[in-house]
Amino acid sequence: MPGWRLREFHSDDLDGVLQLWEAVHRDGEAPVYSLAEVLASCRMDQAVVAVAGDEIVGVSVGRAAHEQGWIVFHTTRADWRGKGIGSAMLAAVEKAMAPHGLSKMSVLLNESSERTEPFLSQGYEIRATRRYLERRIPVQREELGALAELGGRVLPRGRWEAVGGMRHEKELIERRLVLPLARPDLAERYGIVPPRAVVLFGPPGTGKTTFAKAIASRLEWSFVEVFPSRLAGDPQGLAGALRTTFDKVAELEHAVVFIDEVEEIAAKRGGEPPSPLQGVTNELLKIIPAFREQSDRLLVVATNFIRALDPAFLRHGRFDYVIPIGLPDADAREAIWRAMVPQAAEGVDLTALVQASQGFSPADIEFAARKASQHALERSLDAGAAESDAGPTTADYLEAIGGTKATVSDEVQREFLEDIESLARL
């Protein structure tokens, strides 16, 4: 647990906000807006506070003006800075103000203020002078209805950075996909056509879905996941439902569309009598070229069994890249273990866990980590209150790893390496 939490401003928080206001003045950084304006916005506009125990340790106050939002007061108590509170409050205020249909968020800081880091980390950019920062809102109000109808969402910033390790895959995706899409002007200058569709393939549980979401987060585009199993019950049939879904996606300004386990609807055609899914595959093969004609769109499909896909599905002209996503490397495993090991588990030998979990998928590591935590909790309860704060030990984790069967067998890994040689397109 971080030791703090965010919640909406309550009227009884006024004293805490006032104390933070006075602390800012003592530091010689008089806010741009007056105390009366800030308190009025706390009551009438949008405000969130960071709470540690019973104390207010941070506050962020926003106000909407037509299509532009303004941060009128934002601060974190000095002894709580550097813990991610500032960025978290900005994200919460922006989310609360989303119904206003804002196109940008802006902030004016006093000339003496040096505290721009939370704004920069949340995507604000310095404009004109070092003190004026603004952030473009990626999804406009007119898109929200269509996005909600599709079951899509805008993923929070930071998912790309949260993908630990996997340096080769991240660099490849950053250069081939993200850069041309994020900087179309630069791509055009070099004669590069931004990609429109990509296949991610690899063994089960290796993080293909995580990468798809991270791409959307990195671009700050809407993320729409298509679930063929859910569309199958549509009265117009799966093929018709797919067509309707992609027609609705065309209403979005920017979008990453994701289809997991695409082999379910794009398997090899053939056989007598023809499979009922052949019509669905035919429809999907028609949808992709039409989708590719739209700018600011990216179709990401993932498969555990690339050999099962219809050859026509993978041919040039439909997918720009066919990218392998394999088992996490040592750096990635360390990042996953670091995220899974709780703060209470002091002194855990991460190096030993990384070595022992070679060949594990992210899902395998998560399973082993939860298993170790459960065992440690039960042992702590059996021992009584004196040991209630003790977390899992290195031995707990190693025992859990030893009792976890790797999802990816040697045979599957061998086939994956063969598929890279024969099918990958980088």
Image (cartoon, helix red, strand yellow):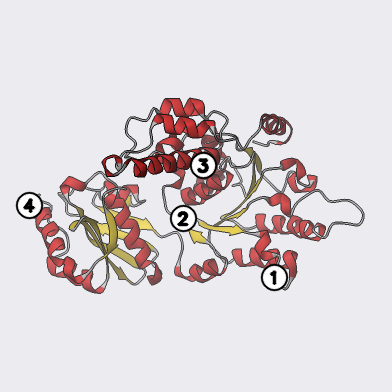
* Real-space CA distance between mark 2 and mark 4, rounded to the nearest whole angstrom: 38 Å
For label 2, the crowd category at 10 Å Cα-Cα, with few meaning under 14, some 14 to 19 and many 20 or more, is: some
* Real-space CA distance between mark 2 and mark 1, rounded to the nearest whole angstrom: 27 Å
**Residue 98 seen in the current view:** yes
> What residue is shown with label 3?
367
Task: Tell me residue 419's x, y (percent).
Answer: 71, 34
For label 3, the crowd category at 10 Å Cα-Cα, with few meaning under 14, some 14 to 19 and many 20 or more, is: some
Q: Is 28 located above or below residue 332 in the figure?
A: below
Eye-nearest disc, 3 or 4: 3
Which quadrant holds the C terminus?
A: top right
> What residue is shown with label 2?
155
Q: Quadrant of residue 257?
A: bottom right
Tags 1 and 4 in contact by the CB under 8 Å rule? no
Q: Could you tell which of marks 1 and 3 lies nearer the N-terminus?
A: 1
Q: Could you tell which of marks 2 and 4 lies nearer the N-terminus?
A: 4
Front-most of 49 and 1?
1
**Residue 128 seen in the current view:** no
For label 4, the crowd category at 10 Å Cα-Cα, with few meaning under 14, some 14 to 19 and many 20 or more, is: few
Task: Tell me residue 131's x, y (percent).
Answer: 23, 51
> What residue is shown with label 4?
26
Task: Tell me residue 87's x, y (percent).
Answer: 31, 51
